[in-house]
Image: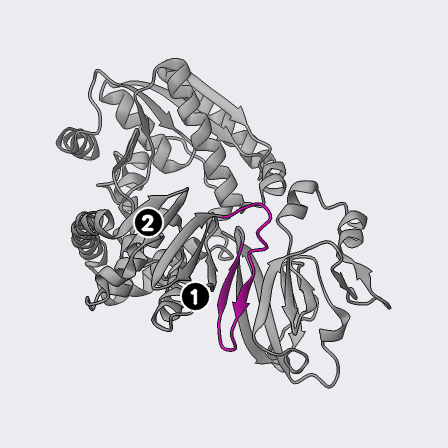
Amino acid sequence: MLLDKFQEYVRKEELFTHEDKILLTVSGGVDSMVLMSLCVNSGYHVGVAHCNFQLRNRESDEDEILVQETARRYGIECHNKRFDTTGEMHRTGESMEMAARRLRYEWFHALCKQHGYTVIAVAHHIDDSIETFFINLLRGTGLRGLTGISNQVGKVVRPLRFATRKEIMEYASRKHIHYREDSSNRSTKYLRNKIRLGLIPRIKDISPRFTPTMESNIRHLTHAQQFIDYAIGNIYKQIVEQKDGLHIIRAEKIKHLDSQDFIIYEILSSHFAFKGDTVDRLCQALDADASGKRFYSRSHVAYIDRKKIVVAPIQEQDECAVEILKGQTRAYCGNSVLYIEECNVDDIASLHQPENVALIDAEMVSFPLTVRKWREGDQFTPFGMIGSKKVSDYLIDHKVSMAEKHRQFVLLSSEKIIWLIGQRIDDSVRITKATERVYKITKESL
C-alpha cells in the first residue's frame, strides 16, 4: 500500500519526523494532492503553500480554489500567493520556467522563516526523475545531469521519490482524491512532455521493466557522481587558488593526466555554471596556448593566461563577445542560448517566424560570427526598412525596458549587425527569391 511505503521511505531516508513542521508545496495536480493526503493520514504537522503564477487564466484560479478547499477540509493552514510571472520574465530576461522556479522557492523559504517550517516537501516521483535524465541527456549536461532528481537538498525533500506515477494515480482513484489536470501537460511543445508522451512509451514497448531499470541506472550514476565530487573536491584544493576576487586554475598541475579536460569541466560547470561545449572550446584554447581568449557562462568569464585558466565574475561593462564558428550548433549570450541550424529554403515551412527566430540567407554571412552586447553607436537596417537606424533608437521606439536593454545582444558578420537578437534581422540578410540555403537561429532562455 502506498501509505505504508511512504512512511517507510520517509523513515529510512530520514527526510522528516513527527517533530518537524512541514511545508507542503501543492499545485493542485495529482502528485501534490496525494502527497497532502499521505502526510495528513500519517499524522505529520503540515501546512500548505500554493503558487498561482497567473499563466493559465481561469485554470490557475480553479487550481487555487481546490487547494484552499482541500486544506480547509483537512484542517491545515494554507498559504497562497499570486505572482506576476510574465512581468518578472520581462524584468529579468528569465524563461517562464526559471522565473517561476525562483519566485516560488524564494517564497517557500520566506514562509519557513516567518512560520517556523523546518522542511519543504515537493511531490516529485520516480517518473519525474527519469524524464529529467532524458532532458539532460539531450542537453548534453554531462554525468551530473543524468543523476535525476535527488530526494533531499537542504530543507527541500521529495518524499514521493520512491513512487511511480502509476502508483500515485491508483492511490488517488482508490481514495477519491480530487485533483486538477494542467492542460499544458498535454502540449507537446514542451520537451518534458515530448519525452513523457512520445519517447518513454515507445521505450516501454521494447523494455517492459523500463522504470525499475532506469531507477537502478540513476542510482548507480548518482553513486558515481558522488565519488567524482569527492575526488574533484580534493583536486580543487590543489590546483585552484583565489586572489583579488579571481579564481586561478593551475591547469599545468594536471596536464599529465588523461582526464585533464574532464577535471576542468567538473570545476567550471559545478562552481561557475559553464556549459559543456563552452568548456570544450576553452580546453582547445588551453592546448593551443591561446592566451587572452575569453569564454562566458551566465555569471562568469574565463580566459587563458600562460597555461592557467583565470575565472572572474562578469563586469557590467563587459560586452560578453563570443565567436560562432561555421558548423557550430549552439552559442550562449547572457541568460539565453542560440541554436543554429543550416537548412534548404524549401525546408522552411513559413517565413513568418516569432521574434526569437531569425531566418538568414546563408550566402550573405561569413564566419566566424560574433555575438556581443549592443553598444552606443551601433546601427543596422531593420528588415523591411530603407536606411539605417541606431539600435538605441530602435529599442526606444519598441518600448524595450531598461532592464531588457542591458541584456540586449547583437549578432554580427564581418563586424556588421545582422540580427538584433530577439528583435529584428538586418534587411541585407533577408530571404529572397534567390536564396537557397538558410541559417535558422533560435534564441531560447536558459
Position above or below: 298 against 74: below
Instruction: Give the crowd class for mark 2: few <14, some 14-19, many >=20 residues within 10 Å.
Output: few
Position above or below: 327 against 308: below
Q: Nearer the viewer, residue 409 or 172?
A: 409
What is the quadrant of residue 413 in the picture?
A: bottom right
- Say if the magenta span includes residue 431: no
Residue matched to label 1: 291
Q: Amino acid at mark 2?
A: Ser
| Residue at 35% from the left image edge and 57% from the top image edge | 136
| Residue at 29% from the left image edge and 32% from the top image edge | 154
**Can residue 93 be seen from the camera position used here?**
yes
Indicate which label's residue lies in the foreground, 2 or 1. Answer: 1
Instruction: Give the crowd class for mark 1: few <14, some 14-19, many >=20 residues within 10 Å.
Output: some
Residue 383 in the image, given as x and y percentages of width and height: 77, 67
| Residue at 51% from the left image edge and 57% from the top image edge | 189
Q: Secondary structure at mark 2?
A: helix
- How many numbered dots are placed on residues in this image? 2
Q: From this viewpoint, which residue is outermost toward the right?
A: 386
Q: Nearer the viewer, residue 76 or 108?
A: 108
Residue matched to label 2: 270
Q: Amino acid at mark 1?
A: Ser
